[in-house]
Image (cartoon, rainbow, N blue to C red):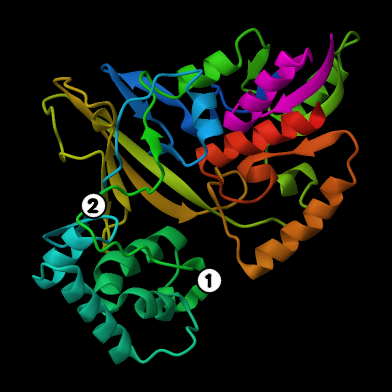
Amino acid sequence: MRYDYLIVGAGLFGAVFAHEMKQKGKRCLVIDRREHIAGNIYTEEIEGIQVHRYGAHIFHTSDKKVWEYINRFAEFNHYVNSPVAVYGEELYNLPFNMNTFSKLWGIRTPAEAKAVIEEQIAQAGIGEPKNLEEQAISLAGRDVYEKLVKGYTEKQWGRDCKELPAFIIKRLPLRFTYDNNYFNDPYQGIPKGGYTAIVQKLLADIPVKTGVSYREFLSQNEKKEDGDTFGRVLYTGMIDEYFDYCYGALEYRSLRFETELIADCDNYQGNAVVNYTERSIPYTRIIEHKHFEFGKQPSTVITREYPCEWKKGDEPYYPMNDEKNNALFARYRKLAEEQDQVLFGGRLGQYRYYDMDKVIAEALFMAEQEG
């Protein structure tokens, strides 16, 4: 078979691109090394509950075009992300807002909260922040940093905050209203029936092969007398892996998930997302999946999320976009630009963290450019 595009990766980027190119009359073949489609937004049903296999994914956007696009493939509910943070025996609302400040300091008004924060910043006496700890304290004061930022951040990045660069936290959103909505975007929700169904619709009538890596597929295809041929390739895997790590490996943070069905409990924690901000607790958060869709099932499913070091062969989740890695990526990007028939897209192909709406926007733009 002659295909116009071989699309490596059946996640959101690859699926949107494949769908758009099919609409333009192009013939596409999609492959993925995992045994399923949908990449990290894959959801699977357990006891009637849509379980987010690779961590919580809450769709949110300020881009009306993207919102209208994704709603062509799913009906979204009115879920609003309002996580809770646990520090010792204390509970705090996120993002940092008047509910948080009232619980921290026993105050009631925005003026009182601002006064406490300003006093703590002044007491710290930090000029130009030299590391993440100093940056966070200079933005939000010591109490917010110690209880709600320090331990969580150190678990996520695997380093002491004094060893992390200040630019990781460019700002800390402090809201002086009693509003627990984590996102400011006007469009937000969870697709009814899960994310996998969206990708299934995007890839409808497009051939998909799972459980095969790019190199395995090329090797298998070359051995066939009547092997498939391709005009162009969209590669959404790791850009350094594509080039055989010729300049060295880019760094990532990885995640490990422990998912548990609790058959004799209908409500484990009362919220979809609960963060654990003490470093002594090894996981960063517990997700209770049924609350994303306001489930009433007699059982529940929870997932503990553990950040961990990444090494070759592990699943890469978060690019380490520090100065060293960005410089290394720039070298790979130059190589990528020299590839006439290969496009690089998505979180791994472009070595940057994307929210789902940005993934869709970038894939639509690339498809438009391809024409």
Residue 74 lies, with reference to residue 237, above or below; the image says: above
From the top left corner, tell me how far across and down residue 280 is, in percent.
Answer: 27, 64
Q: Residue at x 35, y 46 (%)?
A: 305
Q: Residues within 10 Å of mark 2 (few under 14, many from 20)?
A: some
Measured Cα–Cα span from mark 2 to mark 1: 27 Å
Quarter of the figure with residue 320: bottom right
Is 62 contained in the magenta span? no
Magenta part of the protein: which range?
Answer: 1-29
Q: Is residue 165 visible?
A: no
Is 25 contained in the magenta span? yes
Instruction: Mark 2 and mark 1 in contact? Answer it, CB < 8 Å.
Output: no
Q: Earlier in the sequence, mark 2 or mark 1?
A: 1
Task: Say which residue label 1 marks.
Answer: 167
Q: Is residue 297 visible?
A: yes
Task: Say which residue label 2 marks.
Answer: 179
Residue at disc 1, secondary structure:
helix
Question: What's the amino acid at mark 2?
Answer: Asp
From the top left corner, tell me how far across and down residue 235 is, in percent.
Answer: 73, 35
Q: Residue at x 68, y 11 (%)?
A: 207
Left or right: 147 as drawn, with respect to 342: left
Question: What's the amino acid at mark 1?
Answer: Phe
From the top left corner, tell me how far across and down residue 328 is, in percent.
Answer: 74, 62
Instruction: Point out which mark residue 137 bears.
Output: none
Quarter of the figure with residue 265: top left
Quarter of the figure with residue 345: top right
